[in-house]
Amino acid sequence: MLPWKRVLRSAAALLLTAVVATLPAATAAHAADATVTSDSGWNDYSCKPSAAHPRPVVLVHGTFGNSVDNWLGLAPYLIQRGYCVFSLDYGQLPGVPFFHGLGPIDKSAEQLDAFVDKVLAATGAAEADLVGHSQGGMMPRYYLKFLGGAAEVNALIGLAPDNHGATLSGLTHLLPYFPGAEDLLSTATPGLADQIPGSAFLTKLNEGGDTVPGVRYTVIATKYDQVATPYRSQYLDGPDVRNVLLQDLCPVDLSEHLAIGLFDRIAFHEVANSLDPARAKPTTCASVFS
């Protein structure tokens, strides 16, 4: 192995050790229990947003994720910083427990719409902020664009969002060579089929521009992403858009598609900056300790 690669791997190992060491105690206590939500401090419908953080934060899991497992790192991180945090399950298929985000994405957006309405009613807030991982960073754009979500949402922050599809490092390009594969995918797991570049869903979503007025957009990507590839396809064009590459913040951060949403505290720090830009602090490798 080349010396510079050894240095990077050693730095990454130290970074990961720091991440694990600084995870909130609540995360460790509940990591093995996928049924826990409200007693971890999130999905607490008695929570009232503060003057410092006047909008509830709704976390939107990714494909094969759920409202708990996807957020055992980020939810406590935001709660410790004074946010009211909520998360939902969406895109469930009959007979498939725990692994969600597999149903038609337009229907999943309707579920998000209903959930945000519920959160706003409970908290008394006029708007929410959305943070989503993978499909969860892309799907809300349908809600914003076609379901009136722009009137209810201040900001959308995507962690490795597949805004223009997920090629799985090019594997989806092989589907046309397997007769019937795409039809099977569409029938069995329409949420996956909708994420293939060039799908009818993505074509509709991205026609006429990536964004809608009145919403701030942040994309946080990693160049080591192996799912939403190429990683620059995650970026959005339009006003009020920030496209952030994790390695521009911390060059030794080797997080890939899953890690950026599950436990990367450098990414979490940038999420916090995007939620409260007026109080933002520079995100660096040292942010893992903050």
Image (spheres, rainbow, N blue to C red):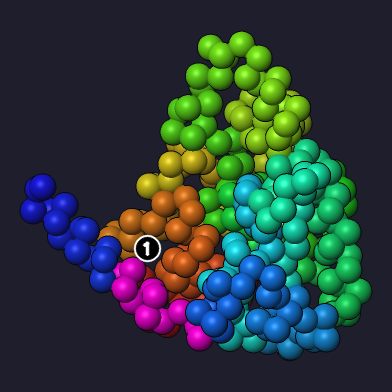
- Residue in the image at 41% along x and 81% along y: 22
| Magenta span contains residue 16 | yes
Whether residue 101 is visible here, answered yes or no, is yes
- Amino acid type assigned to the residue bearing label 1 in the image: Leu
- Residue in the image at 68% along x and 75% along y: 36
Q: Nearer the viewer, residue 205 or 190?
A: 190
Q: Is residue 126 left or right of residue 140?
A: right
Q: Is residue 183 above or below residue 111?
A: above
- Among all residues in the image, which is located at the extreme left? 3
| Magenta span contains residue 252 | no
> Residue 194 placed where, x, y %?
69, 33
Q: Nearer the viewer, residue 116 or 107?
A: 107
Please report the bounds of the magenta region as a residue range: 15-25
> Residue 147 placed where, x, y %?
87, 48
- Residue in the image at 26% along x and 71% along y: 14
- Residue in the image at 52% along x and 32% along y: 167
- Among all residues in the image, which is located at the extreme front? 95
Magenta part, dominant SS: helix
Q: Which residue is the site of mark 1?
A: 249
Whether residue 139 is visible here, answered yes or no, is no
Q: Quadrant of the C terminus?
A: bottom left
Q: Nearer the viewer, residue 236 or 287?
A: 287
